[in-house]
Image: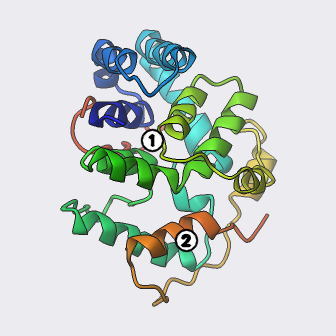
């Protein structure tokens, strides 16, 4: 897993901008040169890059918001899929932020450490074997996101297929199946969306755990929601434009 492909995949998952569109040629070259990806997967990623580059920027942004901001089951925040609003999410955030800090990445107060593009930017700073090992920990989340996007015939599916392919090991099918049993509301079904985003009690406080990488990994792999750079600097999605 080269550093450049990690940055490209990160860029493809942030809110579309004209800068991202202008970088299409550079991103395409990185994808085409990545030997760990199959030819069909490289073609699918290239198609997504071209799709974003050639789309009207406002149409591309609207599609992104409908998919990743309005649809909880497609959230780009890792711990949304394993902890939801439980108190474990707070400690998991602290653990992940500590992991970043130990490797020299210090976040601003506005950045959430489990934002997938940020996670990928972090992996781009790590040795290849370490990066692929860390990528394997949430691979079941990426696989589930790929399946949900495939159901919607979304070209963004290719990004998550690529992440699974680049990980050091394949996700367990039982882990993927468990995530796919969670509700998956359509972004145009407002009633279902309201139900999916209904607030649950949150109690962030001191929690157990050593804060080490292994503890973080166990949280990512075992957590379950209790109910129903190429693109520039650090990947942080801009706020959704106001209507």
Q: Quadrant of residue 110?
A: bottom left
Task: Identify the residue at image location x=36%, y=42%.
Answer: 238
- Name the residue carrying label 1: 240
Q: Nearer the viewer, residue 224 or 172?
A: 172
Q: Distance between the Cα atoms at labels 1 and 2?
A: 29 Å
Left or right of 115 in this view: 184: right
Q: Position of residue 16 (x, y in %)?
A: 41, 28
Q: Is residue 26 above or below residue 13?
A: above
Q: Position of residue 12 (x, y in %)?
A: 42, 30
Q: Residue 179: give its label.
A: none
Q: Residue 219: give its label.
A: 2
Task: Identify the residue at image location x=38%, y=37%.
Answer: 10
Task: Tell me whether circle 1 and circle 2 mark residues in contact (CB < 8 Å).
Answer: no
Q: Secondary structure at mark 2?
A: helix
Q: Position of residue 21 (x, y in %)?
A: 35, 18
Could you tell me if residue 224 is visible in this image? yes
Task: Identify the residue at image location x=58%, y=60%.
Answer: 80
Q: Is residue 171 above or below residue 153?
A: below
Of marks 1 and 2, which one's residue comes earlier in the chain?
A: 2
Crowding at dot 2, Cα within 10 Å, few <14 / some 14-19 / many 20+, comes out as: many
* Front disc: 1 or 2: 2
């Amino acid at each position: 897993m080269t550093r450049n492909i990690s940055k490209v995949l990160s860029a493809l998952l942030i809110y579309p901008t004209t800068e991202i569109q202008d970088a299409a040629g550079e991103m395409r070259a990185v994808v085409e040169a990545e030997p760990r990806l199959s030819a069909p997967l490289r073609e699918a990623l290239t198609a997504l890059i071209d799709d974003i580059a050639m789309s009207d920027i406002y149409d591309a942004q609207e599609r992104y918001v409908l998919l990743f901001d309005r649809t909880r089951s497609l959230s780009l925040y890792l711990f949304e899929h394993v902890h939801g609003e439980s108190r474990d999410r707070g400690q998991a955030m602290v653990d992940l932020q500590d992991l970043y800090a130990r490797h020299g990445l210090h976040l601003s107060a506005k950045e959430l450490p489990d934002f997938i593009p940020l996670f990928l930017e972090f992996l781009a700073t790590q040795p290849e074997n370490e990066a692929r090992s860390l990528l394997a920990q949430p691979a079941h989340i990426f696989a589930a996101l790929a399946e949900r996007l495939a159901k919607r015939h979304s070209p963004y599916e290719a990004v998550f297929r690529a992440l699974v392919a680049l990980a050091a090991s394949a996700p367990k099918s039982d882990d993927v199946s468990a995530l796919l049993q969670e509700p998956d509301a359509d972004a145009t079904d407002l009633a279902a969306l309201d139900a999916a985003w209904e607030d649950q009690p949150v109690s962030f406080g001191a929690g157990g755990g050593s804060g080490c990488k292994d503890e973080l990994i166990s949280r990512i792999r075992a957590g379950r929601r209790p109910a129903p750079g190429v693109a520039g600097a650090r990947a942080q999605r801009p706020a959704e434009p106001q209507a």
